[in-house]
Structures are given as C-alpha cells and as structure tokens.
Image (cartoon, coloured by chain):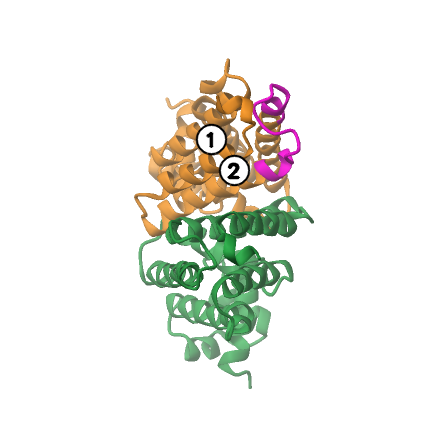
Chain colours: A green, B orange
C-alpha cells in the first residue's frame, strides 16, 4: 500500500515538469499504478491534490534551502540562502527545475485557493530574504542605507532568471552567471568594515 | 467574416492568461463565436495555432519594444529597450502580462516545434540586449571590461522578476523596483567619460 507521502513525492515530480494543472488524478493513477478511487480516498478533489503537492514541495524546499542556513547569521545567512537556492535548482531536486517558479507563473492568472497559497509562500520567501538583509545591516555587514526590499527583489529575480536560462535555453553556465550577479550585488552593498 | 489576424489577436490574449496549452480550438471557437471547422480551415492543428499565436505575439512585441528604439544608439538604445520592455509589461499589452515569460516557462519541459520557436525568439532577444551593450562599449559609454552576456542576463532577469511580482503578488511598485535595479546596474558600468 502506497502511503500518502509516497504518492505526493511522485506527484511533485510530475507537476514540476507538466505543471500543476497537468497533474490530473487520472495521470497520477497511471504513473503510480493505483486506482483512481484509491487516490480519491487520499485527495477529494484536484484542488486538494494541488494544495497537498505544493505543501510537499514547500517541505522539500525548506529541507534543501532553508535548513542548511540555520545557525548562520548576517551576510553569511543571506549568502547561504542564495547559494542553496541556486544549488537546489541546479541539482534538479525537482525534475522540472524550481517548482515554485513554474507553479507561480502557471497560477498567476488563476484566482483561488491554489494561487492564494502560492502567494503566501512566495511572500514568506521574499520576507525571509529581506529579514536576512536587515540582519546583515544590523550586524554592520551591509550598508544601512540600502533598501532591503529592493535587494530581496533583485536576488529573487536573478535566481529565477538562472533557473529560466537553465530550463529553457539549457544554458549550462546559467547558475554561475546568476551567482556572479548576486555576489557582485552583495559585495557592492557591503560595509567597509565587513570587507576587512 | 473574421480574418486570420483578428482571430490571432484574440487568441494571443486568451493564451497570455490561460497558457498556450489552455488555448484549444474549442475554447477559441466559443470565444470568437465561429465554428470549429472555420478555425480548422485557418489552423490545421493545435500546434500550428500555437506557432501562429507566438508569431503574432512576436510582432506585437516588436512594435511595442523594439520599434521605439530604432534610431537610438549605444546606452540610449540599451536603456530604451529596458524601459519599453517594462512599459509593455506594465501597460498590460497582453492581458496576462509578458506573453513570453509565461509561454517560455510553460514550454521549458515540452520538447517540440513550439518550444524550439520560443527558444529561438528568446535567444534573439537576449542577443539583441548583448549587442546593445557591446555597441555602448564601442561608443565608449560602457566599460569595455564588462561581460555583455552577463549584463544581458541580469537585465532580462530583472525584467522578468518585475513582471512576476506584478502578476503574482499584484505588487504595484514592481516595475519601478525593476527599473531602479536596471538603472543602477547600468550606472555602475558606465565609463567616467559618459557620466559627464
């Protein structure tokens, strides 16, 4: 008997390649060789399945990107979040690249619970980046005049841009280009003191 | 009688919101109140319809973003391409935001003619940005030691990031944040001479 968790890990992989809308109960039942009714017992509707898949992707993301930075502070934490994000996307933790880049573009024009959940997660990620910038400002490593929201926006854009170039253009240098841009940006807002 | 062009303009709008895969001959026939057989007369298959829609989107993009920069040179042309891109996305030329951001994420894992065409168009756009950077280097406005490929990557990422924040988060400041980042990046690579 397949557990709910096993089903969801498989479903995340399928959704990361074919999109959340492409993840039908029918397709999943074929991929897992279990009955549709068995799947319906776990997930009452396609929307519930989509939400459960996003929760699973979020847990994997936390393990891959957030957890390795626990214990780090200031600029080290900010750099850690960036490096682990790029590594997570580059290593193909999800076969379709960054799960959230794809899902958020897919649902930006589809109002409902799935979109609301994605917005909440994306805002949490961006706030986390902003907090890391502010922490580095408080510890004197990043210039206090810098707008944390602006920096979080830029880091996030450069990460998603790297994922995009890697996925669409098969650009093998995409993650290096992205990291180069982020490191250069962080160097430029570093305080004199922190450069010593 | 609806012309092919009228059909395609409508189809581009539908695809920019619901995705290219969501654009079925059935949905389009309902939206336009014409028969499926009438549509099949214009487009033999869904793939042909998708390609024709992308060609239409490309023509609109050229009119909105490329054409206004004709006659500009060097840094002015580079800045013009960025400003017109941001304006095109912000004004909602396509109701779903940047058509190509959405389509390229949708098709990054779907091999075939549609993906190949999108890759060719995206490479052309990125090459155009690179060329504009090189032109500004040759005219002495941008530092010659700068890697044009890197700058094009960053501009493109920041543009797509602004579109993403606007579409998903309904961030009204997204395009200003994007423009601030791009202008700051261009200022930083400007030669001393060009700053006078």
Q: Is residue B142 magenta?
A: yes
Q: CA distance from mark 2 to mark 1?
A: 8 Å
Q: Say how many tags the image has.
A: 2
Task: From the viewer's side, name the closer residue of B180 and B7.
Answer: B180
Tell me what residue is drawn at x 45 percent, y 45 percent.
Answer: B161
A105 w.r.t. A139: above or below: above
- Say which residue label 1 marks: B82
Q: Which quadrant of the figure has residue B97? A: top left
- Say which residue label 2 marks: B155
B98 w.r.t. A133: above or below: above
Task: From the viewer's side, name the closer residue of A65 and B114.
Answer: A65
Q: Magenta stretch: give its range.
A: B134-151
**Left or right: residue A48 compared with residue B108:** left
**Left or right: residue B80 compared with residue A182:** left
A70 w.r.t. A76: above or below: below
Tell me what residue is drawn at x 58 percent, y 73 percent.
Answer: A32
- Residue A131: x, y in percent? 39, 62
Task: From the viewer's side, name the closer residue of B102 and A133.
Answer: A133
For the residue labelled by badge 2, is the local secondary structure a helix, a strand or a loop?
helix
Mark toward the start of the polypeptide (2 vs 1) = 1
- Residue B34: x, y in percent? 37, 32
């Amino acid at each position: 008997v397949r557990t709910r968790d096993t089903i969801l890990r498989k479903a995340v992989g399928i959704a990361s390649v074919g999109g959340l809308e492409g993840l039908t109960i029918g397709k999943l039942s074929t991929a897992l060789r279990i009955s549709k009714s068995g799947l319906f017992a776990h997930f009452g509707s396609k929307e519930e399945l989509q939400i459960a898949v996003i929760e699973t992707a979020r847990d994997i993301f936390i393990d891959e990107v957030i957890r390795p930075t626990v214990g780090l502070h200031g600029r080290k934490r900010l750099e850690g979040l960036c490096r682990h994000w790029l590594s997570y996307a580059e290593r193909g933790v999800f076969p379709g690249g960054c799960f959230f880049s794809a899902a958020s573009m897919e649902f930006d024009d589809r109002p409902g619970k799935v979109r609301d959940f994605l917005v909440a997660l994306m805002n949490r990620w961006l706030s986390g980046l902003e907090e890391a910038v502010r922490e580095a400002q408080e510890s004197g490593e990043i210039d206090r005049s810098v707008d944390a929201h602006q920096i979080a926006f830029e880091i996030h854009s450069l990460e998603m841009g790297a994922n995009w170039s890697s996925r669409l253009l098969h650009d093998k240098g995409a993650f290096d280009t992205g990291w180069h841009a982020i490191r250069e940006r962080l160097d430029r807002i570093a305080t004199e003191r922190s450069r010593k």
